Image (tube, rainbow, N blue to C red):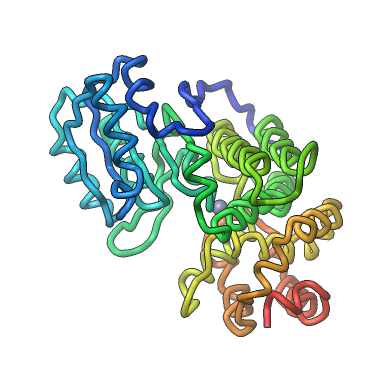
Amino acid sequence: MKHPITPNRQINIPYLMKIGNGKIRKIGRYLFDKDMLKAAVFWGEGIAKMLGKDFYAGIKEYNIELIRDEAVNTIAIEDITKTAFSLPPDTNAIIGIGGGKALDFAKYVAYLLRLPFISVPTSTSNDGFCSPTSSLTVAGARKSVKSSIPYGVVIDLDVIHSCPISFIYSGIGDMFSKVSALWDWKQASLKTQEKYNDFASMLSYNSLDLLYIGHSKDVSTAQFQRSLVNSLLYSGIAMEIAGTSRPASGSEHLISHALDSISEHPQLHGLQVGVASYLCSILQDNTATDALRKILKEIGFFDFVAKNPFKKEEFIKALELAPQIKQNYYTILSEPDSLSRAKEIIATDKILKKLIV
Ligand SMILES: [Zn+2]
């Protein structure tokens, strides 16, 4: 398939990247160093109670003025817009501290006001903390809305370590979903007009190496968690380079979106995409399937999901819905025989039989 030449374009990368222990206490200093002296901070619910003491101590020490300081529990675009335009014009940084919602909220406020956004994730259940999009509700429906990649990412490994292990496994699932996502992207570029970016694809694929090599496969260790955080961060940058979520999202994300809309109790995003990615990689006849199976087995991902498996009826329904979620978007699920083959694989694959019951 012939594609028009893509001109070089400028991309953003985070300029402030701090990953380590005790980082919450240092946010005040990081802001001071970048001359961001008037900041608005948005917290996830209950997070200020946990981390406020350290955060405020650093803020006070460096005389940072908190122009706004509040907990958020909405991701409705109307609420966010209202908040953004109620901030004083001399605000010069937006901080989000928390899980998904607070980060999506703060990221979009910063995008609307063209202000630097400092992302401080308190769990690593997905790659959203460094992605160039916000997951918001628009007129009541969940949408992925264009935003900017964070100016800064501050990750306190002490905080990540204290999270329930389910968040770590969810982050792992989101990471490994690249195996099927990158295959879908490549095929889409061969079969349709969709643009492909070799560098973004390589970066995304190589980020998985961090989880394969050089250290313990025990997901509760600080070493493993540091690698997980680093690799999730690369995802966001690969998406920014590509100008699309393709380097980190394909058929497996469509299945997860469908599960979110039809499940009685949707599971964590990364657990859904991780299982769906394994299924899709078999469907794709993906050459990385064996390696994917091996690593997910080794780090205990399958055993973890098996404790609270997916309902077969819901999973099949999600598979039926998935190809219609995005128009003009080729994935393995666009192939006419995929649904029947997927059902067959779910019924016969030794691992999937325990995860989808
Ligand atoms: Zn994801």
| Between 39 and 189, the one nearer to me in the picture | 39
Q: Is residue 236 above or below residue 173?
A: above
In front of the other: 304 or 293: 304
**Above or below for 351 versus 35:** below
Q: Give the quarter of the figure containing the N terminus.
A: top right
Residue 208, image x, y percentages? 72, 42
- In this orientation, does residue 72 appear? yes
Q: Position of residue 192 (x, y in %)?
A: 67, 48
**Picture layout, residue 233 above or below residue 60:** below
The answer to whether 131 appears left or right of 80 in the picture is right
Residue at image x 68%, y 49%?
178
The residue at 84%/60% (across/down) is: 285
On screen, residue 131 versus residue 281, left or right, reads: left
Residue 13 at x, y = what percent?
Answer: 50, 25
Q: Closer to the camera, 255 or 172?
A: 172
Q: Quadrant of residue 211?
A: top right
